[in-house]
Each structure stands twice: as structure tokens, then as C-alpha cells.
Amino acid sequence: MRRHRSILVVLDGSEAGFGALSESIRLAQWSRGWATAMVVAPPYEGDLSLVGVQNVRAAILGSCEAILDRAVGMAESMGARIEVACEEGEPHSKVSGYADSRGLDLIVLGCSREYSFLKVFTGSAVSRLIETGRRDVLIIPEGASLGWEQALLAMDESDGGGSLMDRAVEVAASYGSGLTALFIENRWWKASPRNISIVAPSGDVPGEMILRELKARALTASVSVDAIREGGPEFRAIRRVTRRLGIQVAMVGWRGRTGLKSLLRGRGIEAVLRGVSCPVLVLGE
């Protein structure tokens, strides 16, 4: 079983980011791992003939230093030590490259209620980071705590084949989580939310085969599974179920063009975060 031991937390100076750092430090302590706080300053694209390049760079580096100083102080107050990194460039590229070069397990982002998303990781930058699929990405809404007792795995008809199931079961087993499997009907306008028995004889019920396969895989890891079928669209179904069941972390998959395709395309993940109070874990390969 593999826990997240090496964690990269991306900071932008917001309270949401520092909240995510605090939760990440606790996770690293529990997993006997370590955390790295990283700030990525976007490249300056203004008119350099009007502003001295050195002054702009000094301002950027000074802001990064102030954020990282606060991060180090926060870690020390929690009895932990963290590594720090400051990069300049395209955020998704710098973060992905840093995580890959060091073989890190998890990338953590804080989601502020004040903005549509992170100041630095706006819109397509988040999608591009997730689309790499190499690392798990954990997005923690502002004010949320990270817990593992009740985990949700959201799936649709594209999630057969076992890769996502194995990763979700692995995570649940690693953290001792109970797992709720949510199958989301693609033809959501014809569906009505209802529970589905995953031990009933196989029939024409959409998703039953996938849910039965998930339970079989979970049994080998001693992970308990409850199953629910809901009508979409995906982000609304996830928001409904996490609220209703008190889910502590919601897991979704990203595998190129499959795995809840419409959820993570464009600003779909932001739509989930606007209504979900729990952290969202996007499972990589």
C-alpha cells in the first residue's frame, strides 16, 4: 500500500494556499514523509522600457521570499521542517517539471472562495497540470480539513478497465478509508438518483458491471464499498453526494481522453469546487 509521502504544495500567497500547506504538513507527518512549499512567479510581460528589469525581478523575488518565509514559520510552529522552492515561468510547466524531476507523490493546491481558482493557477493552467496525469493532484478548498474516513470515487461509463479502480482502492486501503462508489449516468436527463445494489444479478442497469468489478477488487484489499448511482451532469452529482453523505475526500480520475471526460475539461473542475466543501483528489497514473 502506498501513502503520499513526498508532497509538493503550490503557494500563491492566499490564505487558501496556506491552509492547504497546513493540511499537507499534517499528512506528511502522519505518513512519515515530507512537504515542499513552492512558489511560481509568472514571467513579467510588461513594457521593460518603462520599468527597470532589475526592479521588477526584485519585486517578484521579494514576494516569493515573503511567502516562503511564512511557510517555513508555519511548519516550525507545527513541529515540522519543509523544503522550499521558487521558480519563474509558466506555473503548470514549472510545477510538473519539479515534481517529475524529484519523483514526488502528490501536488497540492489551495482553492480560494474569493477567486474562481488560484491566482496563479487560473483556468487552463490547472487543466494542463492535471492533464499530465503523472502525479496525483489534491485540491483543498479554503477552510476545509483533509480526512480519510469517508472517501468517494466518482466514475462514469468510461471508467472500466480497472486502472482507476486499482488506484482508488490503493488509496482507500492506504488510509483506512471507507469507499463510496458513485456511478454517474451520462444520460443524466433520463436518470433519477437512486441507490444501486452491486450484488444483484447483472442486467441492463448502466454501471452495474463497473461497480461489481470495483467491489471485487476492493474485497482483495479489505476495503468496504457502498455504491450509488446518480444522474448528472457530473459536477452536480458529485456536489450532491458529498454534501449528503458527509464525504471527506472525493476522488476522480484523469486518463487522457477517458475518465469523467467532461468533468475535468475546461473549467469543469472549478464547477465542482464551487459547491464541494471537501478536498478533491485527481488520481494520476
Image (cartoon, rainbow, N blue to C red):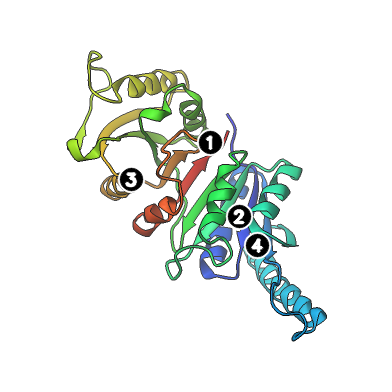
Q: Which residue is mark 1?
A: 256
Q: In the rendered view, tell whether residue 217 sits above or below residue 70.
A: above
Which circle marks residue 75 in the picture?
4
Of the image marks 4 and 2, the number of the one nearer the N terminus:
2
Q: Indicate the quadrant where residue 76 lies.
A: bottom right
How packed is label 1: few (under 14 Cα within 10 Å), some, or many (20 or more)?
few
What's the amino acid at mark 4? Ala
Q: Residue at x 53, y 55 (%)?
A: 124
Q: Which residue is mark 2?
A: 25
Decide if residue 133 is on the left or right side of residue 157.
Answer: right
Q: Are marks 4 and 2 in contact (CB under 8 Å)?
A: yes
Distance (Cα) linking label 2 and label 3: 27 Å
Residue 89 on image: x %, y %: 71, 61
Of the image marks 1 and 4, the number of the one nearer the N terminus:
4
Front disc: 1 or 4: 1
Decide if residue 61 is on the left or right side of residue 169.
Answer: right
What's the amino acid at mark 1? Gly
What's the amino acid at mark 2? Ile
Residue 232 on image: x %, y %: 27, 42
How packed is label 4: few (under 14 Cα within 10 Å), some, or many (20 or more)?
many
Total of numbered circles in the picture? 4
Q: Can residue 263 be seen?
A: yes
Q: Residue at x 52, y 49 (%)?
A: 138
Distance (Cα) linking label 4 and label 2: 7 Å
Q: Residue at x 60, y 67 (%)?
A: 12
Of the image marks 4 and 3, the number of the one nearer the N terminus:
4
Front disc: 4 or 3: 3
Judging from the image, what secondary structure is the residue with disc 3 in?
helix
Which circle marks residue 238 in the picture?
3
